[in-house]
Image (cartoon, rainbow, N blue to C red):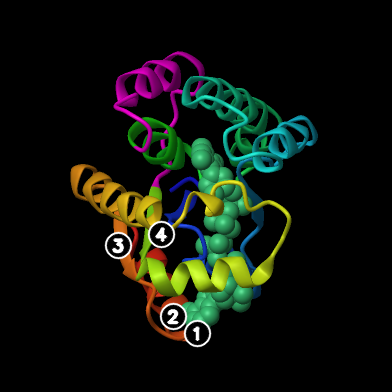
Amino acid sequence: MSAPFITFEGIDGSGKSTQARMLAESLRAAGRDVVLTREPGGSPGAEEIRTLLLTGDPGRWSAETEILLFTAARRDHLEKTIRPALAAGQTVICDRFADSTRIYQGTTRGDLRATVDSLHALMIGREPDLTFVIDMDPEVALARGLARRSGEDRFEEFGLDFQHGLRAGFLALAASAPARCQVIDGNRPAEVVAADVLARVHAWP
Ligand code: ADP
Ligand code: TYD
């Protein structure tokens, strides 16, 4: 079996970064070679695009422009980080990937899902082997997320209704791709969620 490409998805503040880090630590402790990465970003060029996307006025970019920028960042990340790591037999754990574009840009400001899917097919053409969708109450997640005040709050500033829409979008997406998506209850202590995730990675495939 080749090393898997694993992603974490979900609304802002759902615990993706925490879980990605905890999974990487557990797998490394068990002797696996792991690359922990994130989107937007994960390569020097994509990190520069990240700054364009996540800082500034919430209305700075149209949904269409965002699709192009996120896809450009993802292409660079795939070329420079993800593909080389997988080819070298490393497990790749990524905090967000194409599902985030499908939901954030594809559904929240009009129905642009077909545009997202076309560009994905043209420029990315790769799905994760395993995707954990961390599901949680948007009120709790938003409070957690904004408490961090990272300066990268452009999407979080769209508000609570927006997060409810995202949650529904992620759950529908997980239901439509059951072979790779597993929904994880994020309303539990981080260690409990991490043990659940680890057990599922061990059970895969
Ligand atoms: P995301 O990457 O999804 O935005 P983070 O992992 O950064 O989420 O978590 C957001 C905040 O919530 C952080 O301050 C983190 O320490 C905290 N947190 C993460 N997981 C849990 C959990 N299961 N229970 C309580 N707090 C959590
Ligand atoms: P992230 O740093 O994961 O934020 P958080 O830790 O708050 O979940 O992602 C930054 C923001 O970028 C987040 O609000 C989701 C958004 N995003 C998209 O809109 N489309 C995408 O394709 C990706 C990868 C992220």
Residue for badge 2 = 195
Residue for badge 1 = 191
Separation of marks 3 and 4 at Cα, in angstroms: 21 Å
Q: Is residue 200 above or below residue 175?
A: below
Number of the label disc, if any, that sits on residue 183: 3
Residue 191 image position (x, y, % from top left): 50, 85
Secondary structure under tag 4 reads: helix
Q: Is residue 93 visible?
A: no
Marks 1 and 4 in Cβ contact (< 8 Å): no
Identified by mark 4, the residue type is Leu
Residue at 54% from the left image edge and 47% from the top image edge: 155
Sooner in the amino-acid sequence: mark 4 or mark 2: 4
Marks 3 and 4 in Cβ contact (< 8 Å): no
Residue for badge 4 = 160
Marks 2 and 1 in Cβ contact (< 8 Å): yes
Residue at 72% from the left image edge and 60% from the top image edge: 150
Sooner in the amino-acid sequence: mark 3 or mark 2: 3
Q: Is residue 123 magenta?
A: yes
Separation of marks 3 and 1 at Cα, in angstroms: 17 Å
Identified by mark 2, the residue type is Ala
Residue at 46% from the left image edge and 66% from the top image edge: 14
Sooner in the amino-acid sequence: mark 3 or mark 4: 4
Identified by mark 3, the residue type is Val
Identified by mark 1, the residue type is Glu
Residue 16 image position (x, y, % from top left): 51, 62
Residue 107 image position (x, y, % from top left): 33, 35
The mark closer to the camera, 2 or 1, is 1
Q: Is residue 154 above or below residue 145?
A: above
Q: Quadrant of residue 65?
A: top right
